[in-house]
Image (tube, rainbow, N blue to C red):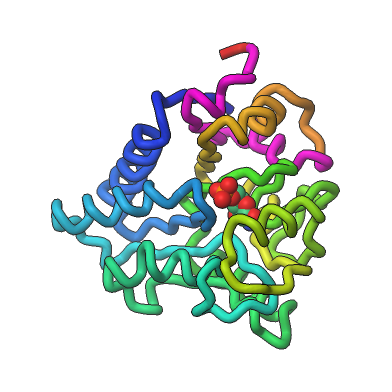
């Protein structure tokens, strides 16, 4: 595992977008999985800008969504689906054959999990996973206490996740109870993982992810065990890390 500290959110976002481009230039049919939420927003913006301005061929690229709130319609602003559609699929005109997301409205969520796992297997696994970190140390919706070996699964959301989620992502009233997410077993099987974080609010959780014990009570600590696990943060998010 290694920590890279960028000057600010903009530098972090531009470099991460370049990492996606570099991968697609060496492996045009790469499978990239990404989190939604605030952190990867500008990385998506830079990625789209570069793909369009440099006319990079992304016709073989395949995208996988990390997680989704259960019970929310895909068109609802704040849903993960909405983030990916507005940030990537629409601006890049990506057809549905080039991505797979969890359907949080599915009546059979178990088969939704199985479908996701088989899509990933059929595509040959995930080449690059770009994830964020929650205020309780979650990755995707792998909440504290999660089994490190799980693949896709449905999980009861932690109180912190519900409180932060309601405040941060939704402008209209929604009920957040469960999440559907790729598991940490999937993360460990990915060829490379980048955990991105920015801002002072993430300083404590980044210190714990980088320097704390590896434990499922703080799921993001698993990144220390990944042979290609990287933590890319800005100076504010790194401000509490002791050994820089
Ligand atoms: C959310 C999502 C994660 C996301 C994390 C951090 O609840 N489930 O996939 O990475 O929390 O989000 P943000 O980047 O908005 O801080």
Q: Is residue 203 left or right of residue 192?
A: right
Seen from the viewer's position, the closer of residues 22 and 75 is 75
Farthest residue in the left direction? Answer: 54
Looking at the rendered image, the quarter that the C terminus falls into is top right
Compared with 139, 68 (above or below) is: below
Give coordinates of residue 35: x percent, y percent.
53, 55
Compared with 28, 173 (above or below) is: below
Residue at image position (74%, 43%) is 136
Seen from the viewer's position, the closer of residues 77 and 91 is 77
Residue at image position (73%, 85%) is 108
Q: Quadrant of residue 32?
A: bottom left
Q: Is residue 10 left or right of residue 34?
A: left
Q: Is residue 167 left or right of residue 235?
A: right
Question: For the magenta stretch, what is the residue range?
Answer: 216-242
Residue at image position (37%, 48%) is 42
Give coordinates of residue 120: x percent, y percent.
54, 65
């Amino acid at each position: 595992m290694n920590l890279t500290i960028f000057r600010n959110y903009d530098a972090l976002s531009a470099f991460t977008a370049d990492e996606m481009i570099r991968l697609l230039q060496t492996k045009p049919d790469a499978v990239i999985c990404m989190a939604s939420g605030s952190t990867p927003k500008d990385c998506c913006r830079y990625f789209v800008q570069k793909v369009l301005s440099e006319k990079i061929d992304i016709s073989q690229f395949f995208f996988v969504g990390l997680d989704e709130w259960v019970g929310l319609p895909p068109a609802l602003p704040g849903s993960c689906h909405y983030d990916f559609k507005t940030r990537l699929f629409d601006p890049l005109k990506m057809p549905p054959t080039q991505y797979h997301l969890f359907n949080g409205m599915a009546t059979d969520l178990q088969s939704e999990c199985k479908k996701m796992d088989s899509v990933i297997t059929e595509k040959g696994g995930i080449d690059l996973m770009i994830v964020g970190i929650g205020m309780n140390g979650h990755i995707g919706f792998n909440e504290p206490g999660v089994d490190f070996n799980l693949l896709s699964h449905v999980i009861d959301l932690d109180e912190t996740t519900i409180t932060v989620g309601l405040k941060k992502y939704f402008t209209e009233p929604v009920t957040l109870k469960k999440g559907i997410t790729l598991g940490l077993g999937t993360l460990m099987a990915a060829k490379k993982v980048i955990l991105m974080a920015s801002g002072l609010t993430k300083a404590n959780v980044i210190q714990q992810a980088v320097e704390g014990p590896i434990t499922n009570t703080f799921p993001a600590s698993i990144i220390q065990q990944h042979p290609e696990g990287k933590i890319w943060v800005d100076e504010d998010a790194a401000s509490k890390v002791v050994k820089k």
